[in-house]
Amino acid sequence: MKQKRFINYCGFLICFVLIFTLTANDIQADDSKTLIIYYSRTGNTKAVCESLAKELNAEIVEVKDLNDRMSKLGIIGGMLKTILGMQTKISPEKIDMTDYTNVILSAPIWAAKVPPAMRTAIYMNGFKDKKVIMLVTCDSFYAEKYQKKTSELVEESGGEVLAFYQIYAMEEKGKEKIERGKGKMVEDTVKLAPEIKKMLTSE
Ligand SMILES: Cc1cc2nc3c(=O)[nH]c(=O)nc-3n(C[C@H](O)[C@H](O)[C@H](O)COP(=O)(O)O)c2cc1C
């Protein structure tokens, strides 16, 4: 009788240790493997990325443009640099990605490209062996030929782009285009999160 109870006890203990180890590995995979790097000028991309970080249990880093892009001159300068494919001063310059296999790069679209702060972050940080997902916010559809060019920036830095997503800041109402607001953009992102999670865990 005592022997049977001992065997039962050992069986229970083994099951417990197995379940705990498997769950701990799962939690660790979700917690530590994905890093979101974003640039945002007016907060749309920031809101989208913060909601995605919560959904994916991911770490998040904001890249700041050290030139003031809120002033008229600043945005004109930013647009020019975007069109010419130039870089800008950013902070942080170097982002430690050693603990991460997955990186989500997120930025608004300016003149069909990523702004200088994101371009600089891509150039300054290699993406060798990283699985990268691009997530942009934009007013309207970001055409595939431009998506491809933006992806090439990452691929030239050694990363593998798994997917390209876009979240819209504007919508049509009758003949007008109106802002959708951050709330709706976040809703779209939350809907997208399971697909992104699946992609990152199955790769
Ligand atoms: C200078 C500038 C250029 C833009 N160019 C485009 C564009 O080419 N295509 C587009 O769909 N949206 C364009 N937009 C809209 C932004 O991509 C969109 O509002 C984005 O959500 C802003 O993100 P943020 O709030 O994170 O800065 C532009 C916005 C600015 C300020």
Image: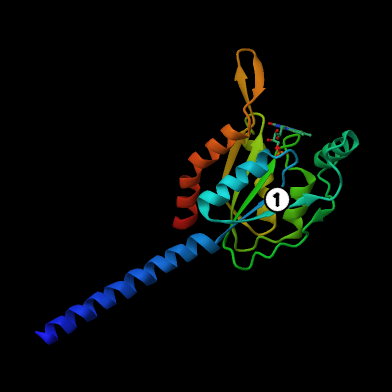
Q: Is residue 148 visible?
A: no
Q: Is residue 19 visible?
A: yes
The residue pinned by badge 1 equals 153
Quarter holding ligand 1: top right
Mark 1 beta carbon near ligand 1 (under 8 Å): no
Residue 63: give x, y in percent of width and height: 74, 52
Kindly give the residue lying farthest to the bottom in the view shown.
3
Residue 53: give x, y in percent of width and height: 57, 51
Residue 202: give x, y in percent of width and height: 44, 56
Q: Residue shown at 67%/44% (left/top)? A: 46
How many marks the image carries: the answer is 1
Mark 1 nearby-residue class (10 Å; few <14, some 14–19, many ≥20): some
Relative side of 12 to 188, left or right: left
Q: Is residue 76 above or below residue 175?
A: below
Kindly give the residue lying farthest to the front in the view shown.
2
Element under disc 1: helix
Kindly give the residue lying farthest to the top in the view shown.
175
Q: Quadrant of residue 181?
A: top right
Q: Nearer the viewer, residue 120 or 182?
A: 182
Q: Residue shown at 69%/55% (left/top)? A: 156
Q: Nearer the viewer, residue 145 or 32?
A: 32
